Amino acid sequence: MNAFLKTLSSRPLPWLDLNGPLTEVVISSRIRLARNLKRHIFPEKLDELAGIDLMETIFEAFSKFPEYERLYNFELNTLSETEKDLLLERRHITHNSVFSTMAGVVIDEEEYFSLLINDEDHLHLQVVRPGLEFQKGWKYINYVDSLLNESLDYEFCNDRGFLTSSPTNVGTGMRVSVLLDLSATYLTGQISGIVQAARVLGYRLHGTDGQEESNRPGRYLISTTQTLGVKEEELLHEFEVFIREVVNSEFRARRKIMADTPHRPLDLISRAYGALKYCFLLDEDEAFDRLMTLRFGVQLGLFEYLTFEMLELAIAYSGNAHLQQVLKEPLGTEDLNRARAMMVRKNIGLEI
């Protein structure tokens, strides 16, 4: 395995760090910019040789950056399946790009910034920060975007803004999203009100399984949808105001539920604890959901020995690619699920 990727496989996911603002509720925040180059057709219709040439052009643009020594770039078709799965689990690439023969990625050493090349668009720049940290994220991604535009000729129309492969991204080309833990909001039956408020303001709220009425309750994504007729800074400000209202609502729900019906969160958290302690087969999705429920329990002060650092490491190693890197051997699905159950128990002190 590549030395940098091997380093990534041995450390927690950076967007789970608790040093960000409001990480009690906001797990992470992401800003993504879609860009395309003039005189090049969109990646879906781009032939392989032209796509590889375009990728090399973008790599060359990054070589002029002052921070170039802190950046790592990879052609995905040169990586092993495990290495690509690792980047997928760490949110640097997409499922679509895994199978591409002309996709590339650039990652900074701290993993807060990455650029995916030849996915839906020629460039997808993204920053992912722990907690609610739009301003720092926007400052950096805007800086990188401006530097790239000095070397690369973006497809831009004065009337419509940046032109993208999807009409829904035309304009700013920007999508902003936050991943939240709204466990108390869900348990108190208030999630439908948040869904309606988001819809009225032009935002979308859905569970991590993609459904508004999620069968994996607690973790929700809220994302922007407007890209035309709006300035980036204004959209970020308005979105942050709304997210802060959602956060405050979750805090109120936590206080209320612990005062009025504490057995409800205790039941949810105890079931997650029991499942992780006594299971012998554990898949990726269940591992993430159960561990995030324990994270909610730690925030409510229900565990004396369990720390956020233990949970962060357990979540990272619950991914197939991370787990196989630790085990140093390829395993089938059932063997992976058995090994994951053992690894999770070990990392959070629940060995039996």
Image (spheres, rainbow, N blue to C red):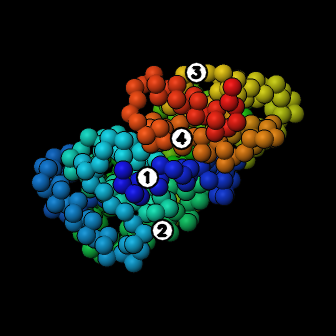
Identified by mark 3, the residue type is Phe
Q: Residues within 10 Å of mark 4 (few under 14, many from 20)?
A: many
Mark closest to the chain's N terminus, 3 or 4:
3
In the drawing, what numbered circle is on residue 280? Answer: 3
Mark 1 highlights which residue?
A: 6
Q: CA distance from mark 4 to mark 2?
A: 29 Å
**Element marked by disc 1:** helix
Mark 3 and mark 4 in contact? Answer it, CB < 8 Å.
Answer: no
Q: Position of residue 42 (x, y in %)?
A: 21, 51
Identified by mark 4, the residue type is Tyr
In the drawing, what numbered circle is on residue 317? Answer: 4
Q: CA distance from mark 3 to mark 4?
A: 16 Å
Q: Position of residue 45 (x, y in %)?
A: 16, 46
Mark closest to the chain's N terminus, 4 or 2:
2
Mark 1 and mark 2 in contact? Answer it, CB < 8 Å.
Answer: no
Mark 4 and mark 2 in contact? Answer it, CB < 8 Å.
Answer: no
Q: Is residue 186 visible?
A: no
